[in-house]
Amino acid sequence: MSDIMKRVQAIIESSENVAGAVSTPGLAGPFSHGVPDPANSPITSTKPVAQPERLPDSHKELEGIIRILTNVIEVSKTKSAELASVQEKIRESEGRLLAIMNHSASIVMLKDVAGRYEFVNRCFEELFDVDAATVIGKTDHQLFGADIGQVLRGCDLETIASAGVTHSFDDVTIGGRAVRLESMRFPLFDLDGVVTSVCTQASDSSLKRHADEQLRLAAKVFDRSGEAIVITDPHAVILTVNAAFTRITHYTIDDVIGKTPRILQSGQHAPEFFEHMWRGLRNDGAWQGEIINRRKNGEIYPEWLTINAVKDDAGDLVNYVSISRDITHVRESQRRIEFLATHDALTGLPNRTLLSDRLDHAICQARRGDHRVAVLFIDLDNFKNINDSLGHDVGDMLLKQATERLKKSVRDSDTLARLGGDEFVAVLSNVSVDDVHVVAARIVDFMATVFQVNENTLFVSASIGISMFPEDGNDSVSLLKNADTAMYSAKDDGRNQYQFFANHMKVLIMQRMALETSLRLALIGGCLRMEYQPKIHLATGAIIGAEALVRWHDPVLGEVAPAQFIPVAEGCGLISILGSRVFEMVSGQIACWRSMGIAVPPIAINVSAHQLREPRFVDNIAAVIASSGVPAYSISIELTESALMERVDQVRERLLQLESMGVTLSVDDFGTGYSSLAYLRKLPIGELKVDRSFIDGLTDQPDDRSVAKTIIDMAHALGMQVVAEGVETLAQLRVLQSQGCDIAQGYLFYRPLAPDEFVRALTAGSLAICGPVLQVENL
């Protein structure tokens, strides 16, 4: 080609030399100059130009060359067009490749051998929240810091050195979030096989790891769930079950794969039940409810079942998933709760609620059938003492034995209920009075026989009150109330018996209610007062103490004796309020006397067993003493012997607390209870009061005199003083003196005195034991 061009150039130069002389008409082309303009011609001679001797065949050769060049040019044009087409295809390929890389779910990046970024795709930009323009030309060190940059650069260098594909896990931090990249690197080479770049493809494996963890967690939940899980195909064919399913149904996974849940059917549901279930699944995609199924061993059990239909993105059904739990224990608990709502937990007998329903039903039946209904209110005598002394466990076992005896005493058609504590009620339907006599007598006899509880031989009896429909009431409330009234009458008459309700009992109940109401008003209105009966030291005749006695004068009822209102206070729960009021009044009176300069001996206050059982009994006394400002030794507490025998450990602890405060303690009515010497020695008792029942027979009953002597000697042996209460005659006094009694109290010396009278008695001096005693007995 170069030779041709040289030849073409020579021909052109040759042609230019003869251009002024020779004109070649008809020759026009890319290389012809035409006829020169004489005006512009560099040849100024007017002589004709000499013609060459011979024109070479240059034209022909030129034409050939031109043809060759024309072909060359055509070929060149064709090659250029092909090259342009190839370049266009390359550009299209580059565009497609760029689009693929930008739309790839993986991170794609290209770095030169120096580690500078040449390209990053959109996934890189989104993950690292950067723009490609800010990344190109930078290194990992500049983007991620020295530590991460050094690690990534090491991976790139490893790829360059290996000239092959390498894999790594790269940990980077993005916006405070740790990301692990699973990376693949490979080198790019030039035509000479030299590495020019490193291409990296990476994916965020933390997302994959999270997904794997979720899958593992789901599998663990499936396997370890406490609820049975069943997965079926759209045709309800079981695909898999979990371990809880096997535990509940006893079917293994091999037993049920390929079968339907019908294998669990118990046969206790009608077809309509399952139609409703499938209708719910079709319409709502879910169903939930209780179902009765059958285990592999044939056992029937209830379960709570939830079924959900699982659909794909197109809305086509792919699976059913059921989750169920055995609710046998739930149902048993519900039945137990329902039972306890209407029955007594200890004995299993109907409670007050169910008793009222059954009594109402019995009354309705009696009205229709014109027959009688009897209500027997049964109370166990002496049960409280057994329960308090031997413990509630023994008391509970005794109640269970008593229940069995009561069940044997009534008919199966009758209702036997426990109201609480030691109180039972029997409802006898369609009976005569004679029938009631037989049943009541049988109960009394059965209860009177010995009870053997563990190693304890126990005795209780039954007091029964009976009311009859329609004579004693037309509804359950009045019948129960009147039977209760008759029961208390049986107790008052000696216990271990039964009594029918009578109208005079109703009068007594009304009086009791009126007394209770008036007592409540008296506690509010301040109608109570205190009187003080002195205690006389028999050796000197001096007043060494007194017993505080509460008195009540009601505007309507008049003077109410303590023997009347104290039992009412104990029965209606007012004894604690009454006792606190007495303590306040006595402490206030002592404080008043002390402020007047009167030397007051210890004043004894009676405390009932009810008060002693109160949890804050000691704290309340301490608070009253502190608020009044009187010394604790100025107050003495008198407890009955029976009160000491209730909850002995608790009583002993509280008495020791009182002693540590400085309060002195005395046992009242001693000789009427069942306390033992061994027990008394453990208590901080300083004084025993001989019950007046022994003092009354002191002069004419040798037994009473012997008992009194024994008590006095025993008390002295234990280091206690003895007080004889209820001394009314000089003969009684002389016997007590001869037996060594320390202190006496009674009408022979003083009646209970008002506060001002008690002060006068204190200031009057000692009483003369012989003769002068009679002069003051009516003071």
Image (cartoon, rainbow, N blue to C red):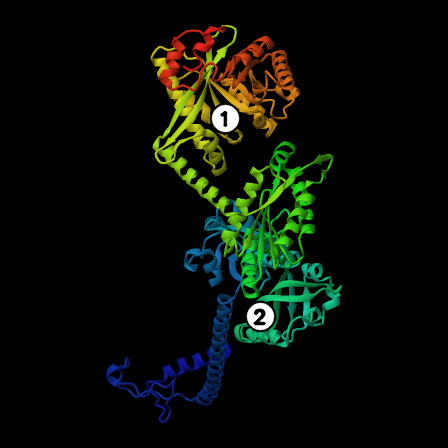
Task: Look at mark 2 in the image and give the residue it sits on.
Answer: 310
Above or below, 693 against 566 in this view is above
Q: Quadrant of residue 463?
A: top right
Could you tell which of marks 2 and 1 lies nearer the N-terminus?
2
In front here: 719 or 20? 719
For residue 539, say whether it is visible.
yes
- Amino acid type at mark 2: Val
Q: Quadrant of residue 553?
A: top left
Q: Position of residue 119 (x, y in %)?
A: 48, 61
- Amino acid type at mark 1: Val
Instruction: Determine whether, in the image, residue 201 is placed left or right of residue 8.
Output: right
Q: Position of residue 641 (x, y in %)?
A: 58, 25
Looking at the rendered structure, the secondary structure element under dot 1 is: strand
Q: Residue furthest front?
A: 700
Above or below, 77 against 547 in this view is below
Q: Residues within 10 Å of mark 1 (few under 14, many from 20)?
A: many
Q: Position of residue 306 (x, y in %)?
A: 59, 65
What is the CA distance from the residue labelled 2 to the residue labelled 1? 76 Å
Contact flag, marks 2 and 1 (Cβ < 8 Å): no
Q: Residue at x 50, y 17 (%)?
A: 728
Task: Look at mark 1 in the image and give the residue it sits on.
Answer: 607
Number of numbered tags placed on the structure image: 2
Instruction: Determine whether, in the image, residue 164 is placed left or right of residue 106.
Output: right
Quarter holding the C terminus?
top left
